[in-house]
Amino acid sequence: MASSCGKTIMDLFKQPAAKRLKRVSSPPQSPASAAVSSFSSAASRSPDDGQGEENGVVSQTGSLTPEQILKIEFNKSLAKAKLNLNRCAEKVTNSISKGEGMQHVKLKELLVEESWLQALPGEFEKPYAKNLCKFVESEICSAGVPIYPPQHLLFNALNTTSIDKVKAVIIGQDPYHGPGQAMGLSFSVPEGVKVPSSLVNIYKELKQDLGCSIPSHGNLEKWAIQGVLLLNAVLTVRHHQANSHANKGWEQFTDDVIRAISQKKKGVVFLLWGNYAQAKGRLIDETKHHVLKSAHPSGLSANRGFFGCRHFSKTNKLMEEMGKPPIDWQL
């Protein structure tokens, strides 16, 4: 199965060292913005602020500023996400190299983030999940229609954003169904792929809300690394067949993900855009969490309540009220 999915977290660590250290000039930023502004593409560069940082270790811990602490935490999360992605890619590569015709990895082996395995104990042993695994694996093995995203990115949202790091959740419906678009993160596409209309509208609202400049790409990995879980309700789709893997079991799986967040965490901000996402509100304990609702950012509905919703600034205000670092939404 082709994996022409543009840049992913692995690519982010391939930047030359000189590029990683180059600063991008920008206006004065909040502490959260400063913590990640040195990353040139989606979530890329390792910071170097002259305090002896190396691979996330600082020699003079007593002299760390809040900005430096945030940088270190960001880089630790980025490194862990990269490790998880590498593990999934190796599993797929090893499966293909066997050349036995069954060029797929068992679905349950592609969720490698330990925190989610602990939060969802025995999930893949449930009857619905066994049926789901059989269905998806048979679809991948079929020589007919390609399945998106590539296998190593099926659980990219969960493998990138561990449950202990989740600060906000943006729920989508199912993956983009064009070649090279889907990367396992809701609304996100790899760099080099045309930015979809819904994401264009998200960027417009960001600019209006927070003054963020509109990026030239649609890769949202930087949000995911900061703790924004970009979760589609359905995690796979056939080529050019929207909702083709709906009602096969994915909805139950991702509902259980949302329930786990609701039950095990406190103070998470859920951004529910459109009726489909808002229906997931039934899974969220609003006495413990914050729920923001608006119309969907698609071209058909953005003018009916998404534009002007100010969900990004509202999320950051809630973060600050809870004593958490705000999200740096600038890409």
Image (spheres, grey):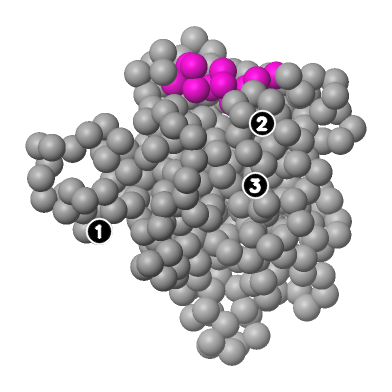
- Structural distance between the alpha carbons of marks 1 and 3: 28 Å
Say which residue label 3 marks: 215
- What mark, if any, has residue 45 been given in the picture? none
Q: Position of residue 243 (x, y in %)?
A: 81, 48
Q: Earlier in the sequence, mark 2 or mark 3?
A: 2
SS of the residue under disc 3: loop
Q: Counting other residues with Cα less than 10 Å from the Cα at mark 1, is it few (<14), some (14-19), or many (20 or more)?
A: few
Q: Position of residue 120 (x, y in %)?
A: 45, 41
**Quarter placement of the C terminus:** top right
Q: Quick one: which residue is furthest to the bottom in this view?
A: 99
Give the residue type at disc 3: Pro
- Structural distance between the alpha carbons of marks 2 and 1: 33 Å
SS of the residue under disc 2: helix
Q: Residue at x 36, y 45 (%)?
A: 74
Give the residue type at disc 1: Asn
User: From what the image shows, is residue 96 above or below residue 270?
Assistant: below
Say which residue label 1 marks: 55
Our reading of the magenta stretch's main secondary structure is helix
Mark 1 vs 3: CB contact within 8 A: no
Q: Residue at x 46, y 56 (%)?
A: 44
Q: Which residues are magenta?
A: 309-319
Give the residue type at disc 2: Lys
Q: Residue at x 13, y 37 (%)?
A: 63
The reply to whether residue 175 is in sight is yes
Q: Position of residue 137 (x, y in %)?
A: 66, 66
Q: Earlier in the sequence, mark 1 or mark 3?
A: 1
Q: Is residue 231 left or right of residue 67?
A: right
